């Protein structure tokens, strides 16, 4: 089963057990049994019949605005949800020590995977000795954190060090990092980071839908009036090995240039052609397989995201402490 990305504007119709998108006089048929999720970037008209059909087939539909920012999700009936798991998830969140333990593991995993990326490029004659020293110093402070706020502060320092290494990795002045900016991103590199992260958040949400976890109850990101939090937590672990590797591949292979961006008030965004190029490379990295020591088989990164959710279930049910995914690079 594969995700569907819709960039064209048009109208969705249901025809028996097939979806069709009618756009500019053309009809594209999409067999429902081949779809894992739908990501909508164009102006697409849908009706209640379409949403019922997607719900029956357990297919989430994610919407992005004209700038490529995540706007929201049609989240079908949670067919795997159960009261016991959700109750334990909520109790775990309310227990400050248990919540902090799990939240810390998200940052431990994210920082370890960032370090793996830096070590990989260090071996390819990029010089990161000083950065890695500062990086390791911050990592050693993680076990000492006593609050979510303290944990987030250290994570922010780690990520700042990491992002400032991007210029050495890509060596392309068009994609200089400068500083992290969002809503809208102010330069080309920040545009790619924001777009990639937005894709990963919705991909992670789709994988969470296939488990008993409630995506509204996160541990690192506070559970509040934000619709979903847990997908943001898990995505932290996979940003370096999926989103950032996608970005480095696209830039170092000269697949993106100035023509793939457009200026907006106060910032820069990918145009439609740029988004399509990014999505193709992003899907390649999601579907890349690695040997998993515990599972004893090759699995894709998409599967690893869902496996991360299963490990969290075991932790909140008291079956096994949660340990995050580390990329063995």
Image (cartoon, grey):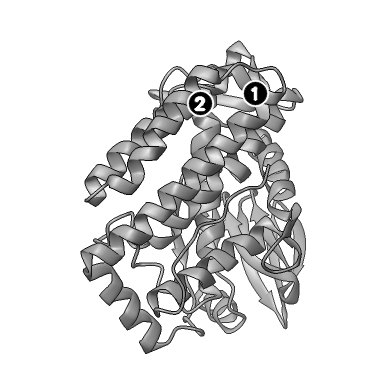
In-front residue for pair 114/31 = 114
Asked which quadrant contains residue 325, the reply is bottom right
In this rendering, is residue 284 above or below 173? below
**Label 1 neighbourhood size at 10 Å, few (<14), some (14-19), many (20+)?**
some
- Give percent across and percent down for residue 105: 42, 55
In this rendering, is residue 277 above or below 285? above
In-front residue for pair 280/231 = 231
Is 290 left, or right, of 169 in this rendering? right
User: What residue would you read off at disc 1?
Assistant: 122
User: What residue would you read off at disc 2?
Assistant: 132
Q: Can residue 183 be seen in this view?
A: no
Q: Can residue 48 be seen in this view?
A: yes
Asked which quadrant contains residue 127, the reply is top right
Is 204 left, or right, of 17 in this rendering? left
Q: Which residue is drawn at 42% across and 25% down?
A: 134
In-front residue for pair 323/35 = 323
Quadrant, the C terminus: top right
Q: Upstream in the sequence, badge 1 or badge 2?
A: 1
Q: Do tag 1 and tag 2 residues touch (Cβ < 8 Å)?
A: yes
Is 107 left, or right, of 32 in this rendering? left
In-front residue for pair 298/223 = 298
Per the image, label 2 sits on a secondary structure element best described as helix
The answer for how far apart the CA atoms under marks 1 and 2 are is 10 Å
Q: Residue at x 74, y 76 (%)?
A: 33
């Amino acid at each position: 089963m594969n995700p569907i990305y819709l960039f064209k504007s048009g109208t969705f119709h249901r025809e028996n057990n097939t979806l069709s998108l009618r756009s500019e006089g053309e009809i594209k048929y999409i067999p429902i049994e081949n779809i894992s999720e739908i990501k909508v970037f164009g102006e697409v008209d849908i009706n209640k019949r379409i949403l019922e059909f997607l719900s029956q087939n357990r297919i989430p539909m994610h919407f992005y605005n004209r700038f490529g920012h995540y706007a929201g999700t049609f989240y079908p009936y949670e067919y795997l949800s159960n009261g016991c798991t959700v109750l334990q998830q909520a109790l775990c969140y309310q227990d400050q020590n248990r919540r902090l333990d799990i939240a810390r593991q998200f940052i431990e995993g994210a920082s370890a995977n960032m370090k793996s990326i830096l070590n990989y490029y260090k071996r390819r004659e990029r010089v990161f000795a000083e950065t890695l020293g500062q990086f390791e110093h911050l990592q050693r402070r993680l076990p000492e954190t006593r609050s979510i706020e303290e944990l987030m502060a250290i994570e922010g320092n780690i990520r700042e060090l990491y992002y400032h290494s991007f210029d050495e990795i890509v060596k392309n002045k068009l994609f200089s990092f400068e500083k992290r900016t969002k809503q809208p991103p102010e330069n080309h590199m920040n545009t790619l980071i924001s777009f990639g992260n937005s894709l990963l958040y919705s991909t992670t949400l789709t994988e969470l839908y296939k488990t008993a976890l409630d995506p509204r109850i996160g541990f690192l990101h506070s559970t509040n009036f934000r619709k979903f939090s847990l997908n943001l937590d898990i995505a932290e672990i996979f940003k370096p090995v999926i989103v950032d590797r996608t970005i480095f591949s696209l830039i170092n292979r000269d697949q993106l240039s100035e023509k793939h961006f457009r200026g907006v008030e106060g910032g820069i965004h990918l145009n439609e052609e740029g988004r399509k190029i990014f999505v193709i490379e992003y899907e390649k990295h999601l579907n890349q397989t690695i040997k998993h020591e515990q599972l004893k088989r090759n699995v894709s990164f998409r599967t690893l995201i869902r496996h991360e959710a299963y490990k969290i279930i075991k932790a909140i049910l008291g079956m096994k402490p949660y340990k995050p995914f580390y990329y063995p690079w």
